[in-house]
Image (tube, coloured by chain):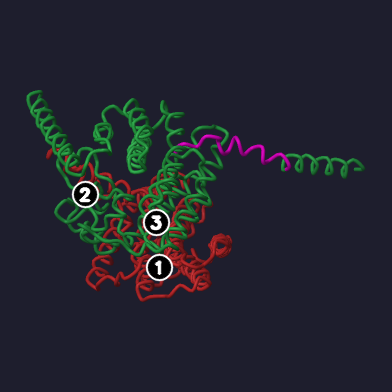
Amino acid sequence: MKFRIYRALARAVVLESIRRKDLWVVAILGFLILLASGALGFFGVQGLQLFAKDLAASVLSLFSAVVAVLTSCRLLPEEIKQRTLYPLLARPISRLDLLIGKLLGAVIVTWIAFLMLCALTAVALTTFHVQFEPIMIQYIIIKMMGLVVLCALSLTFSAYMTPQAAATMSIILAFGSGVIVRGLIMAYNGVGPATQWIYKLIAAALPQLGVFDLGGRAANIGWSPVSGAVVLQLFLYMATYTGAMVLIAWAKFRRQAV
Amino acid sequence: MANVPLVVGFACSLALAAGWNATNLRTVIDPPHPVAGLDVNDTSASASLLGQFRTNTSSWLWLRTDLYLHNGVELRPLTNSEKRAGMQGVGTSEKDLSKALNEDSVVTSIPSPHRDFRGWFGDLDRATAPYKAMKNHSHNNPEQAIPLFRLMTWIDPNFIEGWTVGSTVIARDRSNNGTEKAIQFLNEGLKQNPESISILNELAFTYITRKKDLHTAVQYLELSRVSAVKYRGTLRDDEKEEATQVYRWLGLCYRDLGEREKMIQAVQEGRSMFPDDAVLAILADQPPRILTDKGQAAWEKLRTDAAKGKTAQTEADAHNLN
């Protein structure tokens, strides 16, 4: 029963995204990828395969994160602003169901966009005669798991702040959490034991989106795919963090006057 | 409406005039005395946009090159507090790149398990990122990075390290062909940065070590010396180190060429600029070539004993001071 609700809500998000021509943005981003690869070809393909793979992983990471954030951040505020939330809530669905359905929709839109970008990137890489390896499939799957976490994070921010602020915060965390954690690691031994627990707390609370990015392994030579146990741990982390984010969003949204 | 073609024509003429004179902007965008590498774009406010883009892109490519040499494993310099705590860098087993990349004071960005407080997250990070213990590591074939050096120096011709490290990488091919390519690459860099001490030094070093051509090396070192004297007041620490090298190599080259007067002149000038440099001090104390091998050995033993005694005294003084 719930599944049908979620499916209907997610479908509405996907249709809305198509109606708003969001995927055109993806097409433009994809065109940029092809254009960049063409510019790279200007310098001569010979010897730049490694760079092309690395650049492709970086660009995919950047563009998919942007799509995930922009798609997720506007879902709730738009429903409230356009008053389309009333008919939704008039149906026999809870606000938690609504959040989960919206999140599913955002995730599906993001995944579609990501896979489109992957396909365009694959075309660009083929022109460089880059060999495709099994780890690239694993890269895509694990990246899709990371995008779920990012969508949940953005949706949660949008429950507490304006879409613009939520998008800004999400982008900062998407690209900055790794940097912040590295900074914490470097500073950890320099602080007293009384302060060290704060570092641990911040590191644990920040979304560890970097662990979902196998781009470094996929781009460089000789790295094997990660083990099934690691993939399982990543899945558990994704499920736990996403669940926590949905609950935090629900804590605000369930009391919110619409 | 009749004026529209006129206005469009005027606008086109303006655009054409601007484009025609665009080359004059080069002196603004490319300041005329680029001594340093990445700092060059900060010397003119007008250069900011294009300069920042070029510098950022070349810096980014520089970092990527470092990543490729380490097969994706990210390294970072030790912090001052880590150095004070006695932490050691990972070091490399390849001495020729060790000089260029200075890897005795770097560690992996993702810490090893024993210095990572994150526990499970740290394990996940190490499992998913390109990570391995890098103690005395070797490098990927640097030839893979050569196109990147070409790319970064094309984007930012004032990126001195791109030229010098790029030439080191090219010169790893120890054949004559490799040496010629390295020299050609450095000469391209020299055209863009005619007063760069680092590029001139690298050229001289290549001529000395690979071609054993001291005469040509001295020509480059003399140019470098002129540059060092000209900018002596504004040299950064790394450039001062390069400038010290100039005088050391000049001293050695003139000594081996038998031009003692020039050697003394160069060494004295070097000592006036860098009075604390021990190598220049030793060079200033070199025995004249007229000594026999036995006499020279005796002289060197005498100087070595004196230097050891001085070092011991300095350490004792430092200890007492502490």
In the rendered image, residue A248 lying in the magenta stretch gets the answer no
Contact flag, marks 2 and 1 (Cβ < 8 Å)? no
Question: Which chain shows up in red?
Answer: A
- Label 2: how many Cα within 10 Å (few below 14, some 14–19, many 20+): many
Chain B image colour:
green
Q: Nearer the viewer, mark 1 or mark 3?
A: 3
In the rendered image, is residue A67 in sight? yes
Report the magenta residues as a range. Answer: B20-36
Residue A62, quarter of picture: bottom left
Using the rendered image, report if marks 1 and 3 lie on a common chain: no
Q: Tell me where residue B261 appears, x and y as whole percent.
A: 36, 32
Query: Mark 1 — on which chain does it sit?
Result: A
The circle drawn on residue A6 is: 1
Instruction: Find the distance from the CA under tag 3 to the CA under tag 2.
Output: 20 Å
The circle drawn on residue B89 is: 2
Q: Amino acid at mark 1?
A: Tyr
